[in-house]
Amino acid sequence: MKKLSIVIPIYNEINLLPRVLERLREVEFPLELELILVDDYSKDGTREWLRENEVDKPNVRVFFHKQNIGKGAALRTGFKHATGDIILVQDADLEYDPYEIPKIIQPIIDERCRVAYGSRFLGRVPTGMRLQNFVANRILAWLVIIMFWQVITDEATAYKAFHRDVLDGIKLKCKRFEFCPEVTAKVLMSGERIHEVPVTFFARTFAEGKKIGWKDFVEAVWTMVKCRLKLM
């Protein structure tokens, strides 16, 4: 394996995105790094900042949606253009620590698995996570066990890494936050197993820009059901 593609879906992250990219560039990765930045029609100056600061940088590819579609759509755009042997999702905020990416992808490099998730719940308690979010995450992990017969602790983690052959072998239809349940369900239904690595997590509030809510939990459950019944 020679290259790691980190796909970053972006929507209104002018305050944190520069720090995320700075942090990523400080990390010593064991593979060549490619950054795929997909702006989902931000309206807070993010698009202008990307054009001025990232478009012409080496090993960076920037794509701009012409309308706001959602995180899942931005990820599908990124996956389509990624050229790495391993593809990892990185949110455009600092809830997760980019310094932990090497340990997430190492099991794939070592060929111990082809899918690795960074778990917020494996042997630790997430910092600052609201009780309702904690409960929702536990329910989603439990549903994966019931419907897809693999024990995992964190279905909704943002840190998901895939051997590119895995993503090439499934067809994603997600537009918004249903990416997590859809990709988890389809990966498991394809016969892959998910390896989990513990990661740290620092939750941000809605006032700080967090975008996911209770309706997305309902959509996640429904997405799993549809995948299990092969309706999507």
Image (cartoon, rainbow, N blue to C red):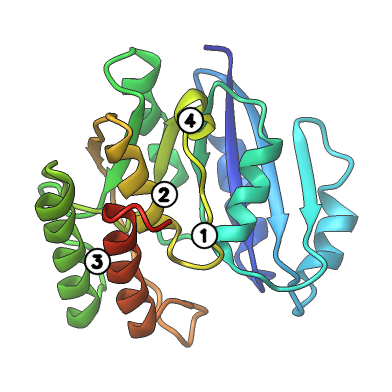
Residue 21 lies, with reference to residue 221, above or below; the image says: above
Q: Is residue 38 left or right of residue 191?
A: right
* Front: mark 3 or 4: 4
Marks 3,2: beta carbons within 8 A: no
Q: Is residue 150 left or right of residue 76?
A: left
Give the Cα separation between the discs numbered 3 and 4.
35 Å
Q: Quadrant of the C terminus?
A: bottom left
The label on residue 205 is: none
* Front: mark 2 or 4: 4
User: Residue 4: horizontal and vertical position, in percent?
Assistant: 56, 26
Say what secondary structure mark 3 lies in: loop
Q: Amino acid at mark 3?
A: Thr
Residue of label 3: 127
User: Residue 3: horizontal and vertical position, in percent?
Assistant: 59, 20
Is residue 99 or residue 48 the one in the foreground?
Answer: 48
User: Residue 126: horizontal and vertical position, in percent?
Assistant: 22, 62
Q: Amino acid at mark 4?
A: Gly
User: Residue 167: horizontal and vertical position, in percent?
Assistant: 49, 34
* Front: mark 3 or 1: 1
The label on residue 174 is: 1
Residue of label 2: 97
Which of marks 4 and 3 precedes in the sequence?
3
Give the Cα separation between the discs numbered 3 and 1.
28 Å
Please tell me in which quadrant of the rendered image residue 163 appears: top left
Residue of label 4: 169
Which of marks 2 and 1 precedes in the sequence?
2
Which of marks 1 and 3 precedes in the sequence?
3
Q: Amino acid at mark 1?
A: Cys
Say what secondary structure mark 4 lies in: loop
Say what secondary structure mark 1 lies in: loop
